Amino acid sequence: MSPHTAHAVNEAHADGALARVDAQDESLAAPIREFLSSQGCVVTSREQAGVTPQYHIMVGSSDFVKEILFSLRESTEKRIAIVWDSIPDIGPVATRTRTKIVRVDARPFTTADVESFFTFFFTSREMLLDVRVHRDEPVVEPLPRVLSSGDEERVGGLIREIFDVAPVEEKPKRRTAHRVPLVVGLIAGIFCMVLFPLVWFAAGIGISAGLLGYSASQWKAGKTDRAVWLATAGFYWVKQAEWALGIVSLPARTAGLGDAVRGPERLVSFLSDVGLGLGRLKDVADDAKLAASTLLRADAAGAGESAAVAIGRLRTSVGAVQNHFSLASAQLGILLRDRTFPFSVNSLYSLGEKGEKAIRGGRKNLSFAEQLLALYPLVGGFRTKQVYLILLQNSMELRPGGGFIGSIMQVTVEDGKMIEMNLQDVYAIDGQLKGHVDPPVGVKELLAQEHWYLRDSNWDPDFRVSGERARWFYEKETGVAVDGVIAVSLPFLTDLLSVTGPLTLSDYDDRITADNFFGKAVFYTQSEFFPGSTQKKDFLGSVTSALFEVLMRDRKVSTPLLFRAAASALERRNLQFYFGGSETERLVERFGWAGSVFAQEGCLSVPTCVFDPLLVSEANVSVNKANAFVTRARTRTVEFKEDGSFVETLLITWRNPSGGPPRDAGGSYRAYMQLVVPQDAVGFDVLVDGKPAGIRTSKNRSAPVPYWESLSRDDRNSIAVAVDIPAGGQAQLSVSYRRGTLLAWDSQVAWYELTEQKQAGAADEPWQLVIRYPIFWQADASGGNGTVPQESFLAKEAQLTYNSTLSADQDIRIRFVK
Amino acid sequence: MKFMIHTDGGARGNPGPAAVGVVIEICQLNQLPNPTNKKPVIIEFGKRIGETTNNVAEYTAVREALKEVKSQKIKGKSEDQKTKIEIHFCLDSMLVVNQLNGIFKVKDAKLRELLVQVKILESEIGGTITYQYVPREQNRRADYFVNHALDTLMSSSQSNSRV
C-alpha cells in the first residue's frame, strides 16, 4: 500500500466518500455503485457537495458526459466515462481531462460488464474500450484482459488492492472450511462435509429469514429494541449459514464448479446486508432521537453536542443503512430475476417480491430522511436567525394550496434550534391589513369576498405562487418579513397524532386521537361558526400546541415513525415549502417538496418522448366543511389515433352523503376545479352530468353554475369549472381536450409519459387510467420516473388499464410499437 | 341447442400474468336467450393461464369456451340434437374476430397455433359457429371473470353458476 493511497483511503473514509458516480440513468449505474460498495468502497454521487473523490465514474450519453467534463476543475482524480452513443465530439475533452472511455450498448449492465469496466479502468493503458454488441464504426479493440471476465473474486481482490480497503468479511469465513479436520472416517466425513453443513445451511437461512422478516415488521411498528434484538439474532444465523455454505461449496469449488454456488452465496449476502441494515437502523433511531432533542426539546438546550454535530452523525448512519439496503435490494433483484432456489418455488417467489417491495419502501423513506437532513443546514438558522410562517390548512374545506388557512404559526430558528413559536388566528391577523387587494375571480365571485386576505392566499395551485403571496400578506399585515413559508395540511396532523398517541385537551376536556381527530375537528369548528370566530383557532390551535408539547417533551415518541409520517406528508403534499428565490428553494424544488406546477420534468433521457402532465386542483367555495364527507373518484382516458394525435378525457365523480346543518357540518357542496394542462392542449369540451356546461367569459360574467372558464396566461394553460354537488346527491364532470403534439416515431417505436399530480390536502381517491390505441400497435408500461410495474396494467386489445389510488403523484411511461 | 358465448382475455403486463373469462348461455334452438318461459343454462368461469400476451389470452378464451361446449356435460344435454348446434361468439377483440373470420392474416406463430386448435374444436363440435365483435361495454360479464381471476391469484379458479 503506497502512502498516498493509504492517505486517500483514510481521507475518503473520513469524508464518507471515495469514488464518485455521476449517472444519467440511475438504474444503469446501480450495478456499478453496488459492485464498488460490495468491495468495501464508499461511493458518492454528483449531488454531494464538498466531497473530493479519488475516482470519478460517469455513466450516460456523450452529451451528458461532455457537460460534466467541461465543468471539471483541475484535479487529480482518475476518471472513466461509460457512454452509450457516439463519442467523436468528446474525444478532445476526454484526452484533455485524461478520461478513459468505455462504449456500451444502452442496456442494464451485468456483473461481468462491470468487472470488465473496472479491469480496463485499473489495468489497461488504453484510453478506449468498446464492449458494444452492435458496432457501427471501427473502434480501438481493448487490450487482452488481464483478468478473466466472470472471475469476480480476482477482480474484487484487485480493486480492493487498488482502493486499499479491507477485504469483506465473508472471505475469511470461507477459509473456516479448511479448519475442518481432514482425517475423518468416510461416513463421518460425508456427513460432516456434506450432509450436516447442508442441513445447517438450510436451517441458518430459514431461521435468519424468519427473524429478519419479523425484525422488519417490528421496525414498522416502531418497536426498536425488539427489532434490533431480532436483527442481531438473524445476523448470527446468517453467519451460521455462511459458515456451512463455505464447507458445502468446497467440493464444488475444488471441482471448478464455483458458478453452482453463486446463487446460495448471493442469498447469504442478501440476508447479511438485510441483517446489517436492520441492525444499524438502531444507530439511526438513536442519532435521530438525539438530534430531535437538540432541535426541539427544551431540556436539551445548552447540554451536550451542537445540533450540527448531531445531524452530521445522523446523516452518516442513514447513509450506511441506505448502502446496506441498496446492496440487499440489488442481490434480491438478481435472485428473483434468475429464479434462484428457494425463489424457484412460487410461494417463496411471491414472498421475495414482497420483501423487495418492503426494501424499496424502506430505501424510499431513508432517501426522504437524507433529503430532509440535506435541507437542515440551510434552514437551521446557522448564519442568521430565520423566521418562518407556518400555514395550518384545514383540508375539510379544501383549497388549491391544501385547505382553508384557519390558523398560522410564526416560528423562529437559530443555531439549529427552535427558539420561539407563536400561534395566531388568521382573522386577527387579517384584520390588520390596511388598504385593498383585489382578489382572484373565484374568490371574489364564488366566495363573495371583496378584499383578498392571507386566509385566501393559497388560491393558486402552484405553491411557489401561493407561498410568495402568503409571505407578502403576512408582511403587509404584521410588518414581519419571513424567510420561508411552510404549508401544513390537516392529514399531516392526523399522521402526527398516530405517532404521538392520544392528546388530552384540558380546555375542551376532551381526548383527541388520530381516529377521532377529523370528527372532533368537524364538531368543534362547526359550532357557532362564523368569520371571525375564535372557536376554530382555539381547537386547531390547542391541538397543534399540544402536539408540539408532546414532541418536545415526550422521549417515548418513536423517531422512525415520526420520520415516516414526515416522508408520507411530503410525498402526499401535505407538507410544502417555499423559501423565495433562494438556494434552499431550488433544493426543495429538486426534492419535489415545493408544490410547484408541474412538480417534475418528464421524458428524461428520451428526446422523442411526449410528456403529458395534469393537475386537478379543487377548491371548496360552499363555505362549509363538506370535504370531510364528500368522496371523489376519477378516470383519465387517453385515446391515440393512427396519426399519433391523441385526445384526453377526465371523468370525475363526486358523492356527497352529508346532510348539512344541523345534522353535520357539510351540506350542499360547490367545487371550483382548476385544471392545469400542457400548453398545447386545445378544444376543451366540458360536460356536467352529461350536459354541456356554460362558458363564462369577460362578456358573460353572469353564467350560472355549472360553468367553465379559461384561466390561461402566458406561462400556464388552465381552465376552471364550477360544479354543484347537492347534499345527499352526486355529480359527474367530464373534461375532454386534445393535444397539439403528435407521438414521435423512431424506428417504429414511440414514447409517451403521463403524470397526474396530486393536490395538497386532498384525500386519497380511486384513480383509473385507460390508454387506448389503434389495434395494430402494441403498448407496454416501461420505466419513467414512476415505479408502477408493468404487471399493474391490464392489457386488452388496443387498451391498457391501470387501477390505483391517487395518494401521491403518478408517473407512467408507455412505449408504443407499430 | 344454441350457445351464446361471451369471451374475454387480458394480461397484467404484456406479456404478463394472463386470464380468460367465459360466459356461456345455452337455450333451445329458435328461442332467444333468456326466454321468459324457460331460463337458459349459464356456465361462466374465469381462469388464469400463466404469463402471456392479451391476444393469446383472447384466443385461449375462445378455445376454452369451445372445450366447455364439447365437454360431456353439455354434450349430454344436446346429444339428441348434435347436428343442430348453433354457437354465436361475442368478443371485444376486433383482431381476433377478424382473424377467426378469415379477414385478417395471422402472422404470429403462437396465435396461428391457437387458431388451428380452435378450428379443430369447431370441426369436432360441428354445427354453425359465428364470431362477432361487440364493444367492451357489452362484454362486461366476461371481463369481470378475467379481472376476478387475476385479482384473486387463483391458479385455476373455475366457478360455474346457474340462474
Image: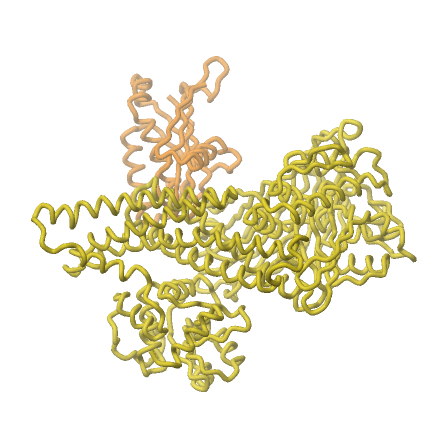
Chain A: give its colour: yellow
- The residue drawn where x is 43% and y is 54% is A277
Q: In the displayed structure, does residue A813 sit left or right of residue B57?
A: right
Q: Residue furthest right?
A: A435
Screen quadrant of the C terminus of chain A: bottom left
Q: In the displayed structure, does residue B85 sit left or right of residue A761?
A: left
A51 versus A397 height, above or below: below
Q: Visible in this render: residue B103?
A: no
Return the residue nearer the eye: A206 or A545. Answer: A545
- The residue drawn where x is 31% and y is 80% is A124
Screen quadrant of the N terminus of chain A: bottom left
Return the residue nearer the eye: A399 or B37. Answer: A399
- The residue drawn where x is 40% and y is 36% is B153
A102 versus A334 height, above or below: below
Return the residue nearer the eye: A69 or B2. Answer: A69
Quarter of the figure with residue B48? top left
- Counting the numbered discs, the total is 0
A288 versus B75 height, above or below: below
Q: In the displayed structure, does residue A352 sit left or right of residue A204?
A: right
Residue A68 in the image: x percent, y percent? 51, 76
Return the residue nearer the eye: A180 or A594. Answer: A180
Q: Residue furthest left?
A: A186
Q: Residue furthest front?
A: A303
Q: How is the image coloured?
A: by chain
Residue A401 in the image: x percent, y percent? 72, 51
Residue A193 in the image: x percent, y percent? 16, 50
Q: Visible in this render: residue A548?
A: yes
**Figure chain in orange:** B
Residue A467 in the image: x percent, y percent? 74, 58
